[in-house]
Image: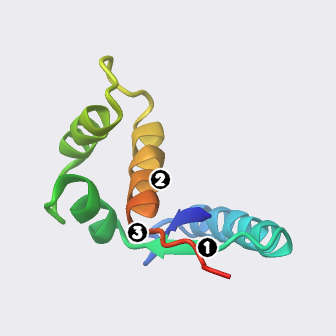
């Protein structure tokens, strides 16, 4: 399964276009491989990792380290965010029973 952060808006149009293009590539690739896709809002991710939907980046990174038993700080911030999304996805994934 794949977990992806759901997007709301961007203040920078250039960034929005690049991110939208990349999301399209990801969705197409995952669909072709028949990999189930789960999207989570930033609030859902923070809630799932820290139990508080308004947690800041420091709180999220700290909880990711606790959950994954990582001692050293996670750098860059995007890596901690990606791990938080993966944790949220893993905690919400129910395999399809055939």
In depth, the one of 67 and 76 nearer the eye is 67
Label 2 vs label 3, nearer the camera: 3
- The local secondary structure at tag 3 comes to helix
Disc 2 + disc 3, Cβ < 8 Å? no
Q: Earlier in the sequence, mark 1 or mark 3?
A: 1
Q: Earlier in the sequence, mark 2 or mark 3?
A: 2
* Residue 37 marker: 1
- Locate residue 43: give its quadrant: bottom left
* Distance from the alpha carbon under mark 1 to that under mark 2: 12 Å
Residue lying at 54% horizontally and 65% vertically, measured from the top left: 4
Position of residue 33 measured from the top left corner of the image (x, y, whole percent): 83, 68
Give the residue pinned by disc 2: 86
Position of residue 37 measured from the top left corner of the image (x, y, whole percent): 61, 73
Position of residue 88 measured from the top left corner of the image (x, y, whole percent): 38, 60
Residue lying at 45% horizontally and 58% vertically, measured from the top left: 90
Residue lying at 50% horizontally and 65% vertically, measured from the top left: 12
* Residue 92 marker: 3
- The local secondary structure at tag 1 comes to strand
* Distance from the alpha carbon under mark 1 to that under mark 3: 12 Å
């Amino acid at each position: 399964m794949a977990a992806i952060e759901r997007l709301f808006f961007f203040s920078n149009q250039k960034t929005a276009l690049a991110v939208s293009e990349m999301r399209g590539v990801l969705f197409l690739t995952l669909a072709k491989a028949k990999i189930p896709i789960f999207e989570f809002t930033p609030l859902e991710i923070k809630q799932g990792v820290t139990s508080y939907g308004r947690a800041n980046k420091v709180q999220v990174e700290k909880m990711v380290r606790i959950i994954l038993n990582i001692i050293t700080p996670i750098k860059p911030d995007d890596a901690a965010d990606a791990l938080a999304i993966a944790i949220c996805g893993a905690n919400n994934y129910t395999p399809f029973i055939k």
